[in-house]
Image (spheres, helix red, strand yellow):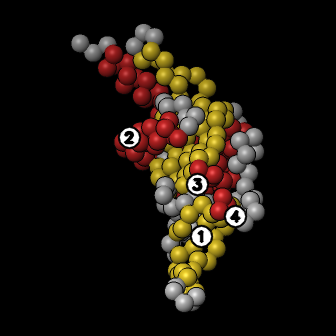
Amino acid sequence: QLAGLDWEVELHPMSVQLPGGITVPTDDKGVVRRDLAPAKESFLGRVGTGFRPLQNHEIFAPLDAATADGKLLYHTAGCINGGKIVWALTEIPGHLTIGKDDEVRRFLLAAQGHDSGMSYHIGFTPVRVVCENTLRMAIEGLSSVREAEKLLGRIRHSRTAKDKVDGLSEALSAAARVYDEVQEMGRRLAYAE
């Protein structure tokens, strides 16, 4: 709520205006913010027939559950391009120490696109997300770290998406263990001959 993300989206039928004033419905749907008056700003994008929207409260639910028991702390959250992309960043208390004094903060990111341009992503990152550029860095990092993808992952906006997101709460309990393994690997590399 503090980040202004307590709004929902809905799908609306789309049509094409042909020459001569004929309107033809299409199979595509328009994703529209429900909290804004009908206007250009409320339209987030065009999606296909298989797209199922995930509401902001649904994608952040696994993070809410983990912050409620103190495992994570909300750090930052926001939206880009009027809500086409939304994200929340939580921090796992403590940090990694690699070598003698190289400290790395431990974040867990949840992000998704309401415009079909980005799947729902959730995963671990050392990147402190504060803008579109740092969000892209974090997402690219998630995509390149296969082990983190296996643990949490990327979820397409399909009919089973909500069930998959609901199942993520269990995986969050492994967050500290993943970072412990990364710290141990970093320690071995820092002191390797």
**Gap between marks 2 and 1 measured at Cα:** 33 Å
Tag 1 secondary structure:
strand
Secondary structure, mark 2, is loop
Q: Hey, which residue is sitting farthest left in the picture?
A: 193
Task: Tell me: residue 128, above or below residue 83.
Answer: above
Q: Looking at numbered disc 3 in the image, what kind of residue is underneath it?
A: Lys
Q: What element carries label 4?
A: loop
Chain-order first, disc 4 or disc 2:
4
The residue where tag 4 is placed is 39
The tag earlier along the polypeptide, 4 or 3, is: 4
**Is residue 169 visible in the rendered structure shown here?**
no
Callouts 4 and 2 close, C-beta under 8 Å = no
**Nearest to viewer (mark 2 / mark 1):** 1
Q: Which of 43 and 88 is in front in this view?
A: 43
Where is mark 2, residue-wise? 145
Q: Mark 4 or mark 3, which is nearer to you?
A: 4
Mark 3: give few (<14), some (14-19) or many (20+) Cα within 10 Å: many
Q: Given the image, on which type of amino acid does mark 2 rest? A: Val
Specify whether 175 is left or right of 67: left
Q: Mark 1 or mark 4, which is nearer to you? A: 4
Q: Position of residue 111 (x, y in %)?
A: 55, 47
Local crowd size for mark 1, using a 10 Å CA cut-off: few (<14), some (14–19), many (≥20): some
Query: What residue is at 74 percent from the left and 59 percent from the top?
Result: 36
Q: Which amino acid does label 1 sit on?
A: Gly
Structural distance between the alpha carbons of marks 2 and 3: 25 Å
